[in-house]
Amino acid sequence: MTDNFLASQRGLLAQHRGLLAQQSGVITRGQALAAGFTDKAIEVRLATGRWQRLYPGVYATFSGEPSRAARLWAAVLRAGTGSALSHQTAAELYGLADSPAPLIHVTVPSGSAVVRPPGVLIHYSGRLAQSRHPVLTPPRTRIDDTVLDIAQHAATLDEAVSLALRAVGSRRTTAALLRTAIQGRPRLRWRTDLVAALGEEHVGAHSLLEYRYGSRVEGPHGLPRGTRQRPVTRGGRREYQDIAYDEYQTVVELDGQAAHPGQSRWRDLRRDNLNAAHGLVTLRLGWVDVTERACESAGVIGATLTHRGWPGVPCQCGPTCRLPPAP
């Protein structure tokens, strides 16, 4: 056995290990053959249980239950060259999904002949070369395209807007980048509403409820624009006020669709008490207050701001506005 032969085998092993490390221990038959394995060597490993077949021609090079990462790699490798994890699965990888979707979503170039593997949902796209992220692994669509892919199939406008604002609020992208991605799609469901939600007048909105506050309570009733997500540091802790009207020492906190239980409730009380200690009044609005009682909420906020120095007066949002009369 020559030194050159041993050196070549060591190099081959290093290349093989690097590929497996990148792909969470998953390899295709073509990759295994290119790395120096023979058909017989592959079959022996499968027969003895050292490897396991995840899909035809796609193997886990270990025994035991494959990890989530290994299953995602297997799905995209089975789909073929140029494919990418997309939709809810890409959102999972970007941290935008609360839990994995029941099916693994993979997008392939239009015209590809792909047999759908079990547990995988195949999408087709004529612009995958542009929407596929150039470096991230496992291969996936860019975050802006991921958001728009999901928005395209969202059941409701609120669902589509909520995801877009969540992506922006978590600093994974920006409103400007999402607007640019929207411009690159000649056909897109909810286009006008998404552009409006990502517009300059709603900059800083981190959630659907914050967007609804601006579009239903604040703007239509002529209230001054508050600062979104204003950072404050108290007792060494950095926190964020949802809507801060600094000039009038008023804070509006938005509590989402359900009341805060247990520990969250006490945290809110602590924040409200600290606001009061600093001369701030805190108003709390829930989902119903913003979406179904927007006019009444605008009246309360307007009256509070007036008492604290705002020279303006809330205005009616339309002929059926339920804004209470000024006191």
Image (cartoon, rainbow, N blue to C red):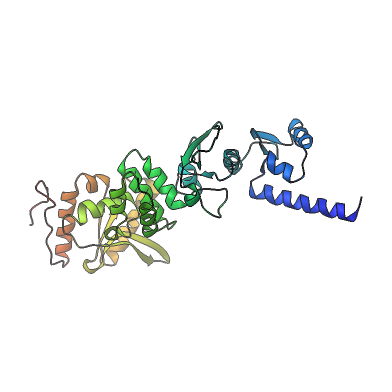
Q: Nearest the camera: 19 or 131? A: 131
Tell me where residue 197 appears, x and y as whole percent.
Answer: 30, 53
Q: Is residue 52 left or right of residue 228?
A: right
Asked if residue 220 is positioned above or below residue 245 in the image, the reply reads: above
Q: Quadrant of the C terminus?
A: bottom left
Q: Is residue 32 left or right of residue 236?
A: right
Residue sitting at x 34%, y 52%: 207
Tell me where residue 34 appears, x and y as whole percent.
Answer: 73, 45
Asked if residue 220 is positioned above or below residue 103 in the image, the reply reads: below
Can I make out residue 149 in this image? yes
Asked if residue 274 is positioned above or below residue 42 in the image, the reply reads: below
Tell me where residue 294 appears, x and y as whole percent.
Answer: 19, 49
Residue 279 found in image quarter: bottom left
Residue sitting at x 33%, y 48%: 161
Residue sitting at x 70%, y 36%: 63
Residue sitting at x 34%, y 38%: 155
Q: Nearest the camera: 114 or 266? A: 114
Q: Nearest the camera: 327 or 91? A: 91
Can I make out residue 254 in this image? no
